[in-house]
Image (tube, rainbow, N blue to C red):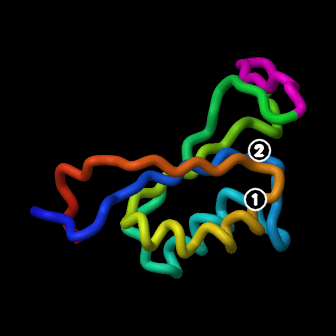
Amino acid sequence: MELEEKAVRMRIYVGESDHYQNMPAYKAVVHYLRQQGVWGATVTRGIYGFGKRSVLHASTPLRLSEDMPMVVESVDSEKKINSLLPVISEMVRGGLITVEEVKVVRHLG
């Protein structure tokens, strides 16, 4: 299958406790991506990491941190992802957003 446009992967890094309009930011982003018809989105919860304030967060058997790193990943055309960035940037004000070109080997869309 040939894609007519370059595909990119967008990664959004937020904290589990970050919110947007009374909803966890990672959930709000996924709902928005779904509404906009993006190919798909996956959220991964980190087990150890730090953010902009350099505070370490760890998931241990005795205590689960309540602000673990969360990563939302999504792949779509460069044009589509770029069109969504202004709204997503507003949703994740304290987060980090990266976009990188990827080679799509298979896409059933």
| Alpha carbons under labels 2 and 1: distance apart | 10 Å
Quadrant housing residue 59: top right
- At x 46%, y 57%, the residue is 74
- At x 66%, y 43%, the residue is 70
Disc nearest the viewer among 2 and 1: 1
Q: Compare marks 2 and 1 and give the one earlier in the sequence.
A: 2
Residue nearer the viewer, 89 or 44: 89
Spot occupied by residue 85 in the image (x, y as percentages of width and height)? 61, 67
* Amino acid bearing label 2: Gly
Q: What is the number of the mark on residue 18?
A: none
Query: Is 71 on the left or on the right of 62, as rendered?
Result: left
As drawn, the residue found furthest toward the left would be: 1
| Residue pointed to by mark 2 | 15
- At x 34%, y 47%, the residue is 102
Quadrant housing residue 44: top right
Q: What is the chief secondary structure element of the magenta stretch?
A: loop
Residue nearer the viewer, 19 or 106: 106
State whether residue 83 is above or below residue 58. below
Does residue 54 belong to the magenta stretch? yes
Q: What is the number of the mark on residue 92?
A: 1
Does residue 57 belong to the magenta stretch? yes
Which range of residues does the magenta coloring cover? 53-63
State whether residue 80 is above or below residue 99. below
- At x 81%, y 31%, the residue is 65
State whether residue 12 is above or below residue 5. above
How many neighbours does mark 1 have within 10 angstroms: few (below 14), some (14-19), or many (20 or more)? Answer: many
Q: How many marks?
A: 2
* Amino acid bearing label 1: Val
How many neighbours does mark 2 have within 10 angstroms: few (below 14), some (14-19), or many (20 or more)? Answer: many
Spot occupied by residue 90 in the image (x, y as percentages of width and height)? 77, 68
